[in-house]
Image: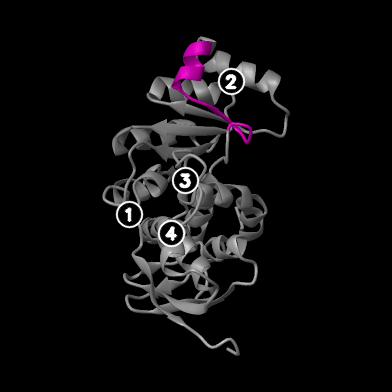
Amino acid sequence: MNNITMMLNADELIKLALREDISSEDVTTNAVMREYCKGQVQLICKQDGIVAGLKVFERVFKLLDDSTVVEFYAKDGENVKNGQLLGTVTGDIRVLLSGERTALNYLQRMSGIATYTNSIAKLLEGSKTKLLDTRKTTPNMRIFEKYAVKAGGGYNHRYNLSDGILLKDNHIGAAGGVKEAIAMAREYAPFVRKIEVETESLEMVKEAVEAGADIIMLDNMTPEQMEEAIKLIDGRAETECSGNVTRENVEKVVNIGVDYISSGALTHSAPILDLSLKNLHPVDEAE
């Protein structure tokens, strides 16, 4: 998920967010600002972290008025500090006021995810293990949240249900077992698709290996069980650890040797990064 891909698909989602916030008019802004007046406001960081979503922030104002000028002094993925000036927004004051909350909602949410992701990714440095997100995302925010994970140093798991095969417990139950589910997936899916299987016991791991799974997810296993599972797999499939992995407990599985650690917490539990638009003031038309 890169910046170009995100922005190609972002406009309709941003418009929905703007319509949610402005159903008919911004009555407060229209009450105090009856006509056009050029102004400028500063984007200020109020907390140390990783910034992500600057182009989305800018696009909010551009969709309201394409003549709005946004200038940034930081880039996505960079460390930012409390009190740092990240940019300025210049244009119709009515646009600056009406777009403020939606723009900040995106930027704070995405920067929070990037910051939290980075804090876990740092704990994996020096190991072979890659940090993955999941589909546990906010509805209609997935494209933004998965981009933020990458900005924070993580990697994207499948984007949606059309993107890859992941046989979870209920798929396995519906198919009648691990071997049966893998066989059905192998028959149905194009040969270029990898097949990942979620396992909850060593017996399921053994079945998945014997049936030729490409990736085996070790779900909600103890570190000791995962070590046994990796010995059993013995390089015959890629391995993924999953199940309530957070910043507080990820170090317990770093040295086990799994290829991937997936964490829903990256997107469903990351706190926002505190950012603010401040010091709004009129500016001369010549500026």
Of pointers 2 and 1, the one earlier in the residue sequence: 2
Of pointers 4 and 1, the one earlier in the residue sequence: 4
Mark 2–mark 4 CB contact (< 8 Å): no
Q: Residue at x 62, y 17 (%)?
A: 183
> What coloring was used for the rendering?
one colour
User: Which amino acid lies under the numbered mark 3 shown in the image of this protein?
Assistant: Asp
User: Which amino acid lies under the numbered mark 2 shown in the image of this protein?
Assistant: Ile
Comparing 13 with 137, the one in front is 13
Please tell me whether mark 4 sits on a helix, a strand or a loop. Answer: helix
Comparing 153 with 197, the one in front is 153
Please tell me whether mark 1 sits on a helix, a strand or a loop. Answer: loop
Of pointers 3 and 1, the one earlier in the residue sequence: 3
Counting the numbered discs, the total is 4
Magenta-highlighted residues:
161-174
Residue under label 3, please give it.
133
| Position of residue 136 measured from the top left corner of the image (x, y, whole percent) | 44, 38
